[in-house]
Amino acid sequence: MKSATAPGGTAEIGVTTIAMNISLERRKFDAVVDYSNITSQPYVFFQRTPRLNVEDIKVDNRRVGFIQGLSLVILLKDFKNGSVEIEYTGDYSTMKKIAPQRGYIEGQITGDMAFLRMEFLRPVLNSIELFHVITVRVKTDRGTVIGPGEEIAPGVWRITFPHGFNGVIPVFVGDFKRMELMNGRLTVYYMGIGEETAMRYANLTEKILSFGVRHFGKPGYEKVKVVYPKGINISSEMFDVLAYSYNPVRYKYGYSYEVAHWWTPGTTIFVTNISQVWFNFAFPAYFSLKYAENVSEDGYIALRNYYVSVYVRGNGLRNKGPSLN
């Protein structure tokens, strides 16, 4: 594991395991996140995710004091090859969708489905390359669990981070149906929509994914998954999981933009210069333009003009931008 620089010293985390218990019946969850094989001097600084109630923190199986706040600082003087275990709980009965900005979470629970995102305490050690593998174990009182990475056992997901990317972790719980395409490379999970509609969405995803492979090579993930949850307002790409709550047939060019994120940062790294992360937004725009050009001339022109208008507004150019009609 590559060392990460922290204020006052260096730190390494060898293994990260998250164990979650999600109850759709009680609309609550509790979890334990365990960071093992840590070396640090003189402390580890954890980002405190709002709306989580931290109940207990152990260092090498010994309880330590802490203060509930926007961050948690655990003193680790003379700390070598040990572990930090943090227990926390959450209540989805009062939670609404929250934009994932500045450490806030995005999550919802509607009927028979729960979506959790960023529900763990991330160590902050001034590094974008802190850990490469996380194991997530989820239990639920009903429904199935969908997570990023590879399902190595029922409800157990092993997430391999792309090099130089620290991302967030999405977890879905619900009575999802599934179908596989592209010889198992693409798995589609759906809930609350008919099988015929799900098949149309899945076929569109396969077309866009195949288009990307032909023009840009294989994405950074061996396998990818799409979740179509009706009645939950999300639309974003998280690791190898694409969650989309709108009609991708109607918004297929915007949908192709989201699919393109499987190529970035999966095959693109920004370890030495994080300022180049702009490529994460530029490449999907180019990808969606190429896809639109392949499908519809009118769609291509409209999409180009849209991207130019976004650029013009963002740079205060007003009407100085080129006309692309």
Image (tube, helix red, strand yellow):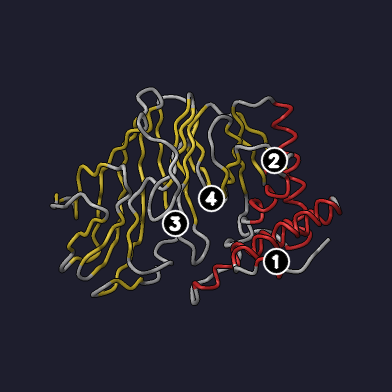
Say which label, 1 or 4, has the lower sequence index.
Answer: 4
Front: mark 3 or 4? 4
**Mark 1 vs mark 4: in front:** 1
Numbered disc in front, either 2 or 1: 1
* Residue 299 vs residue 213, the one in the foreground: 299
Q: Quadrant of residue 38?
A: bottom left
Q: Label 3: state its secondary structure.
A: strand
Residue type beneath disc 2: Pro
Q: Amino acid at mark 4?
A: Met
Q: Is residue 154 left or right of residue 16?
A: right
Find residue 129 and name its label: none
Q: CA distance from mark 2 to mark 3?
A: 31 Å
Give me the residue at 20% from left, 59% from top: 74
Q: Of marks 2 and 3, which one's residue comes earlier in the chain?
A: 3
56 to 281, vertically: above or below = above
The residue pinned by badge 3 equals 133
Picture quarter with the C terminus: bottom right
Give amino acid for label 3: Val
In the rendered view, does 108 fall on the left or right side of 3? right
The local crowd at label 1, few if under 14, some if 14 to 19, many if 20 or more residues have their Cα within 10 Å, is few
Q: Nearer the viewer, residue 38 or 289?
A: 289
